[in-house]
Image (spheres, coloured by chain):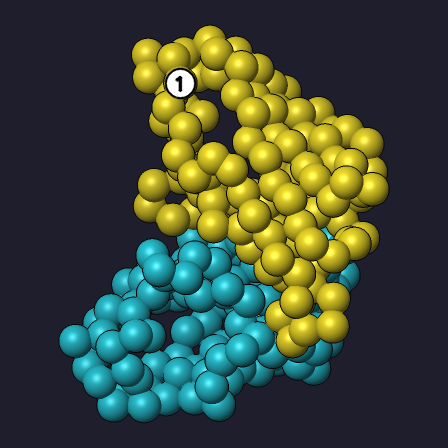
Amino acid sequence: KAGVTQTPRYLIKTRGQQVTLSCSPISGHRSVSWYQQTPGQGLQFLFEYFSETQRNKGNFPGRFSGRQFSNSRSEMNVSTLELGDSALYLCASSIGDLPNQPQHFGDGTRLSIL
Amino acid sequence: KNEVEQSPQNLTAQEGEFITINCSYSVGISALHWLQQHPGGGIVSLFMLSSGKKKHGRLIATINIQEKHSSLHITASHPRDSAVYICAAPNQGGSEKLVFGKGTKLTVNP
């Protein structure tokens, strides 16, 4: 069974640009969650999608958005990039919605802002 | 918001030692997660537990709901156990679904 796939693995952007990251969950998993990891803040919850609906969003500005498609694949978008957006972005999928389900993580997208 | 604290922040051990990592949280929860992150970033979910104890190979996780405390133990530690271990708890009344500890960086020397 294929794991969670995130693309791209690495990305370099400049301030002011926008970026879209993709996540393909494990087949049959309906919940996809996104996380940001930085050295200073550690892991932080971004948002969770379940059956194409955003269930929760963490304390991030409106520049961070996402969506989930009918096949459960998810994308997150960050507009007007800032230097502080440099981070490892992880997605995880689970059969049911958080927080009472084990999660399966992708390898992450490492985003660097110049 | 649930506050999640982990200790120690860093831990160095010799191969074969028994390891304990602690996690405490401030608000009662339904389940707690233990995660392992290797250099390079990949995260593996080790345990999700809501009561008692779970064991997988040399790893044991325990939780005390009344004391709002969980521990992760590694028996007969090995250099391949070197990683960052992170606990995560559900957030009650906040926008974040999960709140994470800062992680414990474990280094096991041969």
B75 in relation to A107, above or below: above
Is B76 on the left or on the right of B12, as rendered? right
B37 in relation to A9, above or below: above
Image position, residue A95 (x, y; %): 73, 58
- Location of mark 1 (residue): B13
Return the residue found at the far left. Answer: A114
Q: Residues within 10 Å of mark 1 (few under 14, many from 20)?
A: some
Image position, residue B84 (x, y; %): 43, 39
Image position, residue A67 (x, y; %): 57, 82
User: Could you say which quadrant of the image residue B10 lies in?
Assistant: top left
Q: Amino acid at mark 1?
A: Ala
| Residue B36 visible here | no
Q: Colour of chain A?
A: cyan
Question: Of helix, strand and loop, which one carries label 1?
Answer: strand
Residue name at image x 19 percent, y 82 percent: A14
Nearer-the-camera pick, B79 or A30: B79
Residue name at image x 32 percent, y 90 percent: A80
Nearer-the-camera pick, A113 or B11: B11
Residue name at image x 68 percent, y 73 percent: B94
Residue name at image x 34 percent, y 65 percent: A87
Question: Which chain contains the residue that carries disc 1?
Answer: B
User: Could you say which quadrant of the image residue B29 lies in?
Assistant: bottom right
Image position, residue A27 (x, y; %): 65, 58
Q: How many marks?
A: 1
A58 in relation to B40, above or below: below
